[in-house]
Image: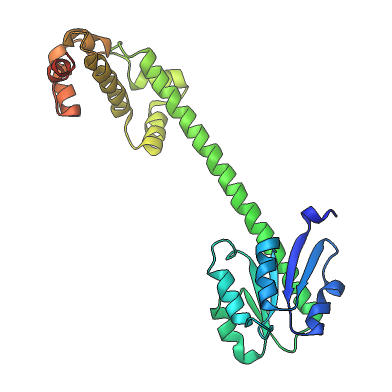
């Protein structure tokens, strides 16, 4: 397999046994990189961005616990799986430092290899699940936007028709009135009547802000035959009368 697709394991070791374990245990699709010291290990982490780090807590130059804490406190490296190896007396300290696992000495090569493979498999599965959820959410958001946009278009196309309301929208969208009410309330938080009114009022505001059209013409243009009733509803919606908006635009 091409190295571009291979999972990388960084081994920061202080013993030959730890250095040798991986070549016999892990699959050939995994690339193993070794480092003799903690300082070298930090440099390699930044360079390689490995999937898993196996670190002997007694690694020379930089204590393995400090090495783990440094990586886990850095947002760019905190996601990397770290397995610490050391005396059982340091197990709690190792886990508190942020390690995903702590293997007590003496360790079993084969068991350690399986732990690493399982860690990689788990992370791969989690990434796949997250990617799938993001995809589903994006598709759902897209469907929601398309539904709302379709309703808005229907209202705009019939905005001057005072009789255009929930029954007409339900008919043109091929849904029942009850389904339309539930779906729109769930997606937008408003009822169908509120949705239609919002569009009518915002359109009326745009027309009045031009300063060109009389209030009665604007009222008729957005589906209100009675201009007095329109003015009353407009004031409720914007806390200003249509006449005040028109005067301000003149």
Whole-percent x, y for residue 218 in the image: 22, 11
The answer to which of 239 and 174 lies nearer the viewer is 239
Query: Which residue is rendered at x = 36% and y = 13% of the image?
Result: 158
Tell how many labels: 0
User: Would you say residue 165 is visible in this rendering?
Assistant: yes
The image position of residue 169, as x and y in percent, is: 39, 20
Q: Is 236 in front, or is 12?
A: 12
Q: In the displayed orientation, state which residue is furthest to the bottom.
A: 89
The answer to whether 63 is drawn above or below residue 80 in the figure is: below
Q: Quarter-wise, where is residue 111 in the image?
A: bottom right
Of 203 and 174, which appears nearest the observer?
203
Q: Seen in the image, is 118 located left or right of residue 199?
A: right
Q: Residue at x 57, y 43 (%)?
A: 136
In the rendered image, the quadrant that contains the N terminus is bottom right
Quarter of the C terminus within the rendering: top left
**Vertical arrangement, residue 110 with respect to residue 187, above or below:** below
The image quadrant of residue 231 is: top left
Report whether 165 appears left or right of 84: left
* Left or right: 98, with 5 as reference point: left
- Colour convention: rainbow
**x, y percentage for residue 235?**
15, 25
Q: Is residue 49 visible?
A: no
For the point 32% across and 34% down, which residue is it?
A: 190
């Amino acid at each position: 397999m091409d190295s571009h697709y291979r999972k990388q394991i960084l081994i920061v070791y202080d013993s030959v046994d730890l250095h040798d374990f991986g070549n016999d245990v892990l699959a050939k699709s995994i690339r193993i990189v070794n480092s003799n010291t903690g300082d070298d290990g930090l440099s390699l982490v930044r360079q390689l961005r490995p999937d898993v780090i196996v670190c002997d807590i007694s690694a020379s130059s930089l204590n393995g616990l400090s090495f783990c804490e440094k990586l886990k406190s850095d947002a760019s490296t905190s996601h990397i799986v770290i397995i610490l190896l050391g005396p059982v007396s340091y197990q709690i300290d190792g886990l508190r430092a942020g390690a995903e696992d702590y293997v007590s000495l003496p360790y079993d090569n084969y068991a350690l290899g399986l732990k690493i493979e399982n860690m990689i498999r788990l992370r791969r599965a989690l990434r796949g699940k997250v990617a799938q959820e993001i995809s589903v959410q994006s598709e759902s958001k897209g469907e929601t936007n398309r539904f709302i946009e379709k309703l808005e278009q229907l209202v705009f196309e019939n905005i001057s028709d005072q009789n255009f309301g929930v029954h007409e929208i339900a008919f043109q969208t091929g849904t029942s009135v009850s389904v339309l009410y539930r779906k729109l309330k769930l997606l937008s938080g408003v009822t169908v009547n509120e949705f239609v009114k919002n569009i009518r009022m915002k359109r009326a505001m745009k027309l009045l802000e031009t300063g060109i059209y009389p209030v009665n013409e604007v009222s008729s243009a957005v589906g209100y035959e009675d201009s007095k009733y329109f003015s009353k509803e407009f004031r409720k919606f914007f806390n200003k009368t249509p006449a005040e908006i028109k005067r301000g635009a003149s």
